[in-house]
Image (cartoon, helix red, strand yellow):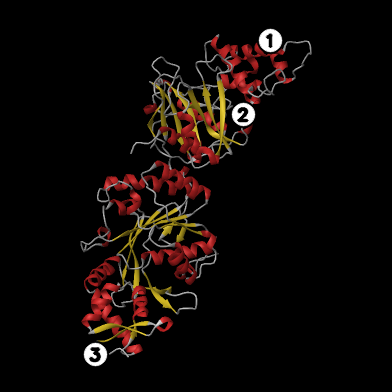
């Protein structure tokens, strides 16, 4: 599916904190300095950016890849984004040591890279990545603007399109990247940061005595020409070998900087620095970087393609189980079973324990008490008011604010939807468990029977789980092939079971018609969990609420997933016989005349369809009889010989 590149850029902006976001427009037909203007959009107005950009034909459009606290493009107002960014210029993006999540071609052979992360990226770390990948050393700082994809680059006569090369690269854990990206060193091997003091320390021996004095203790003479002094300081810094960002950082807060308090002061100072750099050829002499052309691999001694880590350097970690050996934070669990067996009911019951901070009944011996967490249940089928809320109340949910049901459809293959899931649900709401029930409708145009399609569609979801420490619980139905092995019984490709770290099967107890069994089919994280049994029992009606029910934990059982799969297959063939057993059971308790609606309710609790009940009634020689009027009207199931009284 082709996607509007400007909307893709807006999705990138949504990843970052901030109250306002900046889109800069340069009109090449106007002379400087009046040809540049910053436009700010509140977070609630980000959807307006595509229409705004469309109106800027004939102009160069840029965006700042992070947000601001105030509508002024200054680093003091910047909010650290959940991404790295770098102006790769002529670097070959396919040879970078760290592949960008999003790659944009700003003009033929010149690129901009973005690396998505799970945490905000400090400016200094973004600078380190810039030097590490050999990008333009002047394109790392906050308040930097980079070309907007989907627009034209008017710097060239043929006005090439700024295009997205890819946007499906890896997403990264910040802590892991921080270990991979080396510190930037000065000539004397001292790491240096991006602060003015660091820059001064790195270049101190190359600066004239007068410049050092004006940097440390500037003495402003009212008769002095501030413009001339500032220009001289810029030239001195450039001659010492500083980059544009180093000069800017060093001089911005200096008393001689006459632009500091002006509305467009940053841009004015940058233009002066650009002018000085235009008269001087060279890069940073102190803060080392790789050349923009292909790296000289002979100089990369000590650097390896593989990140080799011996086990003595690895810190042992334990899985964080929400339900021991069944559902873990950061992992994917798949539950499988036939329609009507009560999979959703069981998972909702588990979700109640997560929301209220309770262990499930078979884990009462676990130490301590779990913290209540937020749960998001993706379910487009059940009504929130008539089904979900009623079941939650009947099963004792206390912290209703922790249970969110999403009824909006979304596709796991749609970048916009994935980003919204990450930013709005995982980051925004702080959800720690996401149920998707069933999974198939959320796969977009992926072929459910193609393992590669399934793996690709679910891989980003799995990455989000590990990135943010969120438990993902998927649900799918069994196929109709009557597979002998439970691992191969799920509908669609084996790719579903291959991607999930834990797979569980829910089916019927071989000996107890009203009891379901949850059994472990696969566990790549630990020992298999022990099989458990549960039933769904009807509750008495109240004046205000009808069709009530509750899940009852029935204890441990000794059946495997293959055992209950065989029972499920038999149950499918004998559903009418099971309905007949239920009718006989009710008639034994109530007599020859039984309330039809109460029978349906009991059947629903046992996952017996009305169709099966009707067929069973005919086989037993029963018919429906309507008796009474108004509030006393009721439908009964009676023997064929009964007459209407």
Label 2 crowd bin: few (<14), some (14–19), many (20+), radius 10 Å: some
Q: How far, Cα to Cα, is label 2 from label 1?
A: 24 Å
Q: Is residue 257 above or below residue 525?
A: above
Q: Position of residue 6 (x, y in %)?
A: 44, 33
> Of helix, strand and loop, which one carries label 3?
loop
Q: Position of residue 545 (x, y in %)?
A: 47, 74
Mark sitting earlier along the chain (3/1): 1
Q: Residue at x 26, y 83 (%)?
A: 623
Q: In the rendered image, which quarter is residue 338 located in? A: bottom left
**Badge number at residue 615:** none
Seen from the viewer's position, the closer of residues 413 and 357 is: 413
Seen from the viewer's position, the closer of residues 179 and 65 is: 65
**Circle 2/circle 3 CB separation < 8 Å:** no
Which quadrant: the N terminus?
A: top left
Q: Residue at x 29, y 51 (%)?
A: 495
> Of helix, strand and loop, which one carries label 1?
helix
Mark sitting earlier along the chain (2/1): 2
Q: Residue at x 54, y 11 (%)?
A: 278
Which quadrant: the C terminus?
A: bottom left
Mark 1 highlights which residue? Answer: 228
> Of helix, strand and loop, which one carries label 2?
loop
Q: Is residue 370 visible?
A: no
Mark sitting earlier along the chain (2/3): 2
Q: Is residue 145 visible?
A: yes
Seen from the viewer's position, the closer of residues 116 and 294 is: 116
Label 3 crowd bin: few (<14), some (14–19), many (20+), radius 10 Å: few
The answer to whether 552 appears left or right of 562 in the picture is right
Q: How far, Cα to Cα, is label 2 from label 3?
A: 89 Å
Q: Position of residue 228 (x, y in %)?
A: 68, 10
Q: Position of residue 508 (x, y in %)?
A: 30, 71
Mark 2 highlights which residue? Answer: 74
């Amino acid at each position: 599916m082709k996607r509007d590149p400007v909307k893709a850029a807006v999705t990138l902006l949504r990843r970052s904190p901030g109250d306002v976001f900046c889109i800069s427009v340069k009109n090449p037909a106007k002379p400087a300095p009046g040809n540049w203007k910053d436009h700010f959009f509140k977070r609630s107005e980000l959807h307006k950016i595509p229409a705004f950009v469309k109106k800027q034909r004939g102009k160069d459009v840029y965006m700042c890849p992070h947000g601001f606290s105030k509508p002024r493009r200054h680093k003091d107002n910047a909010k650290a984004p959940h991404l790295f960014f770098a102006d790769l210029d002529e670097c070959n993006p396919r040879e970078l040591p760290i592949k960008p999540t999003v790659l944009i071609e700003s003009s033929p052979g010149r690129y901009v890279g973005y690396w998505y992360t799970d945490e905000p990226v400090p400016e200094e770390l973004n600078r380190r990545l810039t030097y590490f990948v050999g990008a333009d050393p002047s394109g790392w700082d906050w308040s930097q603007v980079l070309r907007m994809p989907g627009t034209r680059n008017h710097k060239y006569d043929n006005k090439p399109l700024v295009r997205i090369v890819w946007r499906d690269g890896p997403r990264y854990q910040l802590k892991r990247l921080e270990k991979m990206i080396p510190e930037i060193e000065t000539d004397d091997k001292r790491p240096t940061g991006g602060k003015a003091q660091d820059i001064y320390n790195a270049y101190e021996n190359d600066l004239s005595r007068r410049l050092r004095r004006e940097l440390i203790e500037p003495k402003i003479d009212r008769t002095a020409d501030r413009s001339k002094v500032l220009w001289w300081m810029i030239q001195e810094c450039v001659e010492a070998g500083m980059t544009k960002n180093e000069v800017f950082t060093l001089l911005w807060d200096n008393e001689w900087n006459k632009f500091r308090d002006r509305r467009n002061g940053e841009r004015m100072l940058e233009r002066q620095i650009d002018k000085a750099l235009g008269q001087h050829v060279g890069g940073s002499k102190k803060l080392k970087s790789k050349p923009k052309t292909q790296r000289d691999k002979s100089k990369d001694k000590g650097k390896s393609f593989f990140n080799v880590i011996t086990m003595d350097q690895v810190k042992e970690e334990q899985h964080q189980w929400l339900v021991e050996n069944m559902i873990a934070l950061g992992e994917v669990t798949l539950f499988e079973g036939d329609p009507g067996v009560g999979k959703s009911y069981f998972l909702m019951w588990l979700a109640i324990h997560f929301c209220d901070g309770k262990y499930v009944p078979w884990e009462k011996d676990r130490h301590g008490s779990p913290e209540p967490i937020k749960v998001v249940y993706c379910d487009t089928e059940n009504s929130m008011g008539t089904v979900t809320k009623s079941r939650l109340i009947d099963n004792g949910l206390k912290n209703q604010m922790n249970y969110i049901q999403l009824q909006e459809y979304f596709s796991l293959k749609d970048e916009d939807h994935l980003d919204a899931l990450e930013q709005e649900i995982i980051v925004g709401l702080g959800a720690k468990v996401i149920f998707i029930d069933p999974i198939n409708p959320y796969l977009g145009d992926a072929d459910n029977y193609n393992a590669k399609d399934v793996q690709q569609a679910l891989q980003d979801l799995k990455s989000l789980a590990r990135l943010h420490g969120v438990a993902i619980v998927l649900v799918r139905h069994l196929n109709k092939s009557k597979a002998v092995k439970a691992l191969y019984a799920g509908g669609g490709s084996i790719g579903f079971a291959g991607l999930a770290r834990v797979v569980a099967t829910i089916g019927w107890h071989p000996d107890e018609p009203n009891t379901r069994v949850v059994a472990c089919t696969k566990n790549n994280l630990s020992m298999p969990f022990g099989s458990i049994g549960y039933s769904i029992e009807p509750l008495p009606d109240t004046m205000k609420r009808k069709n009530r029910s509750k899940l009852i934990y029935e204890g441990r059982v000794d059946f495997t997933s293959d055992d209950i799969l065989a029972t499920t297959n038999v149950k499918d063939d004998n559903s009418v016989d099971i309905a007949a057993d239920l009718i006989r059971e009710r008639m034994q308790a109530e007599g020859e005349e039984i309330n039809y609606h109460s029978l349906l309710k009991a059947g629903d609790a046992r996952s017996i369809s009305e169709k099966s009940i009707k067929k069973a009634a005919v086989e037993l020689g029963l018919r429906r009889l309507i008796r009474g009027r108004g509030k006393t009207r009721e439908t009964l199931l009676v023997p064929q010989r009964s007459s209407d009284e």
